[in-house]
Image (cartoon, rainbow, N blue to C red):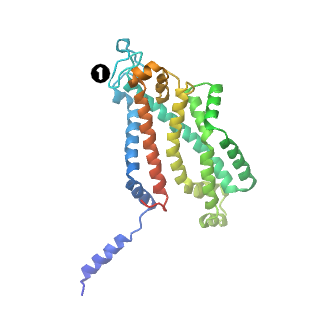
Amino acid sequence: MPTRAAEDDQFGGLRRQTAVISPARQTLRRFLRHRMAVIGLVVAAIVVLAAVLAPVVTRSAGPDVIDLRARNEGPSAEHWLGTDRTGRDTFTRVVYAGRVSLSVGVAAVLISVAIGTTLGAIAGFNGGLLDSVVMRITDVIMTFPAIVILLTVAAITGPGITQTVVILGLLNWPIPCRLVRAKLLSIREQEFVLAARAMGARRSRILISHALPNALDVLIVYASLGIATAILLEAGLSFLGLGVQPPTPSWGNMLNVARNVSVLEQYPWQWLPAGIAIVITVLSINFVGDGLRDALDPRTKL
């Protein structure tokens, strides 16, 4: 016959096995099982920290310090990634450029998410004529080639950080709009929303307190992937001279020097580090986005 202590241990172990795990902890566990996502998160965190702590990391007075005696020098102990044609340290400029490129990406995504979430929530939760009007406007905007709109608007408004952020934000809002609308179309018919309506809750309160929080998963995934897309678009605009303007460094306008054949062939350290920084950052953010998408989807097995 089993003793009372043995029975308590057995039932105690059963209770521990059947303990309810919170959704947040389940999501975290699923994310941590995604190895590439964890690696991407670590790399992205390093890039962000380096950009935030740029003065400490570079130990330099700034990215625009000119030393004409060190023009076009290759990598050395003093200049880890060499210098450009005016003697500015390439490593310092790459680190400071990360601040600009990451800031542009985050700000552009915030604008697109704010606009897209507002319109998508209104359309998806209310339906009817309002939903049809918003979706038709979204369809029209999504039919235009993104790069053509970017180049046209940038040429009209002029280059600059603010213009680049606004253009990227206004161009990409249809994507989160469609995501939020699709999510709310299913949420608005669920029991907890119907119960809130039956209790007399206002539509605005139901939307803000009950419906939108359940759409955060798709917005988080979009935001992570959207930042990478915005960084690439900013780099393309700056490379063409229509984005962030010198002397303010960004990864895109640092690549602009590669349009000169002599620089492209003879001084690769002046443009290659910026290109590598773009690739590493975008890949790491994409890995994080993939991990979040799988972790937030309970149907995915990791």
Can you tell which quarter of the image residue 32 is in? bottom left
Where does residue 162 sit, x and y in percent of width and height? 57, 29
SS under mark 1? loop
Residue displayed at 64% across by 58% down: 185
Which residue is at the far right? 129
The residue indicated by pointer 1 is: 78
Q: Quadrant of the C terminus?
A: bottom left
Q: How many marks?
A: 1
Residue displayed at 55% across by 29% down: 237
Where does residue 36 sit, x and y in percent of width and height? 39, 49
Where does residue 54 sit, x and y in percent of width and height? 38, 30
| Few, some or many residues within 10 Å of mark 1 (<14, 14–19, 20+) | few
Position of residue 210 in the picture relative to residue 291 (left or right): right
Q: Is residue 225 above or below residue 233?
A: below
Residue displayed at 61% across by 67% down: 191
Position of residue 107 in the picture relative to residue 41 (left or right): right
Q: Is residue 171 above or below residue 180?
A: above
In this rendered view, identify the residue nearer to me: 26 or 245: 245
Residue 248 in sight = no
Where does residue 18 sit, x and y in percent of width and height? 38, 71
Residue 188 in sight = yes
Residue displayed at 40% across by 45% down: 40
Position of residue 246 in the picture relative to residue 61 (left or right): right
The disc labelled 1 sits on which kind of residue?
A: Glu
In this rendered view, identify the residue nearer to me: 233 or 214: 233
Q: Is residue 104 above or below residue 130?
A: above
Q: Quadrant of the N terminus?
A: bottom left
Which residue is at the far bottom? 1
In this rendered view, identify the residue nearer to me: 211 or 296: 296
